[in-house]
Amino acid sequence: MDTLAIFGAGKLGEALLSGLRRAGRTPEEIVIVERYEERAAFLLEKYQVRAVAPAEAVAHARTLIVAVKPQDVGVLLDSLAPVVTPDHLVVSVAAGIPTKYYEQRLADGVPVIRVMPNTPALVDEAMSVVSGGAHAEEKHLAAAEALLRPVGKVRRLPESQQDAVTALSGSGPAYFFFLVEAMIDAGILLGIPRDVAADLIVQSALGAAKMLSEAGTHPVQLREAVTSPGGTTIAAIRELERHGVRAALIDAIEAARNRSVELGHLY
């Protein structure tokens, strides 16, 4: 199994590291590049992986996962450019940065895969979308998919759709958290203790998500199955429609897509 290096061990980098270790990768097969010594020591203790300098990571590994903050990618590529070759595979999980940005700054022919994962990677339920750059072949895309599969589901799409993916699934968990937060507040308003309201809503969300995943039917059909004529659910749905919740959600996701496009133009 090829050795890999993770550049940047923040929340997303650690989520990938954690998933790879749970999937059977040994500490000898992974190195990290982490500029904060305290963070590196924490990861060494928790996952038994060692932190090394960028040049050593490139010498040690063939697959390079770039998980630093987008604003730090340029500096990182400056340090990697002299040592990264077309024999490496660069997998970028840095939001908004196109593959051509890497290709322009690294040696000609270096294969680059752009990935948009999301934070449920922490519980092995991520939705990750991979897109290949100009030099990425089928074997590179397959390798990236295999790398991400231990932390959730993986889909392959053209890079032109990555801004929409960012808005839908990259930011998606935040929309659900926002909705759950509002529903818990509603429970408190109705006199239910916070911990009980949270338990009711979170379990309902888990059950609804499982039904969506396994039923194989359209969400409208599932919603209609709960919506009895003249009942409580239709009264709630009417209020949601009256307040334009559906339109607001569509506008919000479109705004996220537009912001992703703007950020991509910075690189």
Image: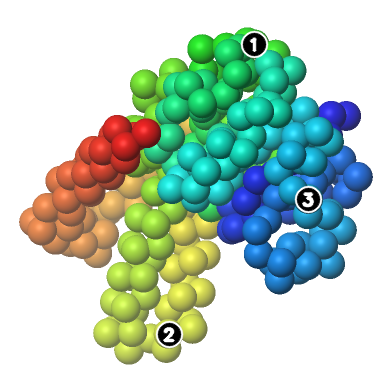
Please provide percent x and percent y for residue 77.
56, 36
Give above or below for 164 relative to 12. above
Position of the C terminus by quadrant: top left
Q: Residue at x 49, y 66 (%)?
A: 202
| Image quadrant in which you'd find residue 5 | top right
Q: CA distance from mark 2 to mark 1?
A: 50 Å
Residue identified by numbered label 2: 194
Tell which residue pokes out farthest to the front in this image: 82
Nearer the observer, disc 2 or disc 3?
A: 3
In the rendered structure, which disc, 2 or 3, sits on the residue that comes first in sequence? Answer: 3
Position of the N terminus by quadrant: top right
Q: Residue at x 18, y 44 (%)?
A: 251
- Identify the amino acid type marked 1: Glu
- Identify the amino acid type marked 2: Arg
Residue identified by numbered label 3: 52
Residue identified by numbered label 1: 138
Q: CA distance from mark 3 to mark 1?
A: 30 Å
Instruction: Please indicate, yes or no, whether residue 221 appears anywhere in the rendered image.
Output: no
Nearer the observer, 119 or 42: 42
Is residue 15 left or right of 133 when viewed as pictured? right
Nearer the observer, 247 or 69: 69
In the rendered structure, which disc, 2 or 1, sits on the residue that comes first in sequence? Answer: 1
